[in-house]
Amino acid sequence: MNVFITRKLPDELLQPLRDAGISYTEWTEPNRLPQDELIRQCKQHDAMLSAGRIDMNTHFLNECSNLKLIALMSVGYDNIDIATATRLGIPVSNTPGVLSKATAETAFLLMIAAARKAFYLHQRIIQGEWHSFDPFTDLGIDLQGATLGIFGLGSIGYEMAKRCKAAYDMNIIYHNRSSNKKAEEELHATKVSFETLLQQSDVLSVHAALTTETRNKFDKAAFSQMKKNTIFINTARGALHSEQDLIKAIQTGTIWGAGLDVTNPEPMDKNNPLLFMPTVAVLPHIGSATVKTRYGMARLAVDNVIAGLRGEQLPQIINK
Ligand code: DGY
């Protein structure tokens, strides 16, 4: 039994594969793995562990229908054609849960950075623009007692809400298909319509998966319903918001600003206007990038590979 791993992983994380008698090939090149090479490799392996965002489209899946398992080292799976994988009988696993706290912390960081213009002011120091103390310039907005709106209240959204409640006693509202009883009981969160979420949130934080329903959900029409002081946070997927509409909404003062860990496309162009706006903070998709979290994600992906190749029940599976 063997597995193709799309990135070099720390050696100690691969010990369980060796112990299980599973051999592996890692893609060690720093450059992006081309699809023809990915297909060539996957045809020679029983399973694939995808550590990084690779487009697993219909063509790839049809070519690699030999795979007994695709183990993603991510919670999101919008980069794989799940319907085709299911039709071909290929189980696909992901790594939810282990990354919720780290990703929520990234959202929390971006919220404060946007509220206090932190990334912009850091740049100003580098540019030699720190002059005398002026009590009425570079002012931010307060978060104490503000209303936090969560779009998609799963485990990452819950961790964000928990942090905002503890730090700033925020009033939590959320929009989700199902009710989140835990958040309602512990954080006094209230489920609201999408319109109410837009109209009442001082901070609107996106934690939903990218689907045909959520793609471009935050567009001109959505931003125009928000308050002038709203901070828009997206640590989920860049395609949930329209970048052009977001730029306009901030430039025209329709909303206060934004904190983005995800953009569309990625990487973001270095001349993108969002990078130069005082009330915007952008990070390069590092939501889950802590040592503990990334090791946890890799361990779970490896556990999924072992279970899948042994024909056991997967610890995590997307397409049951
Ligand atoms: C995830 O786990 O989905 C992260 O966004 C990395 O793709």
Image: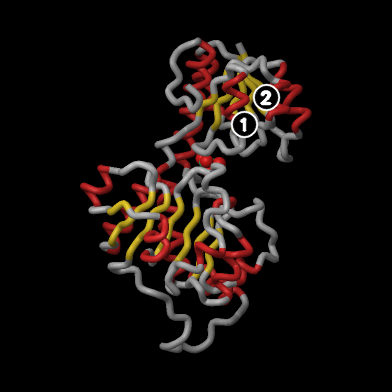
184 lies left or right of 293: left
Q: Indicate the quadrant containing the N terminus: top left, top right, bottom left or bottom right.
A: top right
- Whichever of labels 2 and 1 marks the residue nearer the N terminus, that label is 2
Q: For mark 1, what is the residue?
A: 81
Which residue of the protein is positioned furthest toward the right in this rendering? 36
Identify which residue, 127 or 73, lies in the foreground: 73
57 lies left or right of 238: right
Q: Where does the image place residue 169, in percent across and percent down from the top left? A: 26, 62
Q: Is residue 246 above or below residue 61?
A: below
Give residue 245's quadrant in the image.
bottom right
Question: What is the spatial separation of the Cα atoms under label 2 and label 1, in whole angstroms?
Answer: 8 Å
- Residue type indicated by callout 1: Asp
Q: For mark 2, what is the residue?
A: 61
The residue tagged with tag 1: helix, strand or loop?
A: loop
The residue tagged with tag 2: helix, strand or loop?
A: helix
**Residue at screen point 53% across, 67% down:** 280
- Residue type indicated by callout 2: Leu
Give residue 86's quadrant in the image.
top right
- Kindly indicate whether the residue at mark 1 contacts the one at mark 2 (C-beta within 8 angstroms): yes
Identify which residue, 25 or 208, lies in the foreground: 208
**Residue at screen point 53% across, 86% down:** 131
**Residue at screen point 54% across, 21% down:** 91
Q: Where does the image place residue 49, in percent across and percent down from the top left? A: 59, 26
Q: Where does the image place residue 272, in percent across and percent down from the top left? A: 67, 65
Q: Where does the image place residue 254, in percent across and percent down from the top left? A: 51, 73
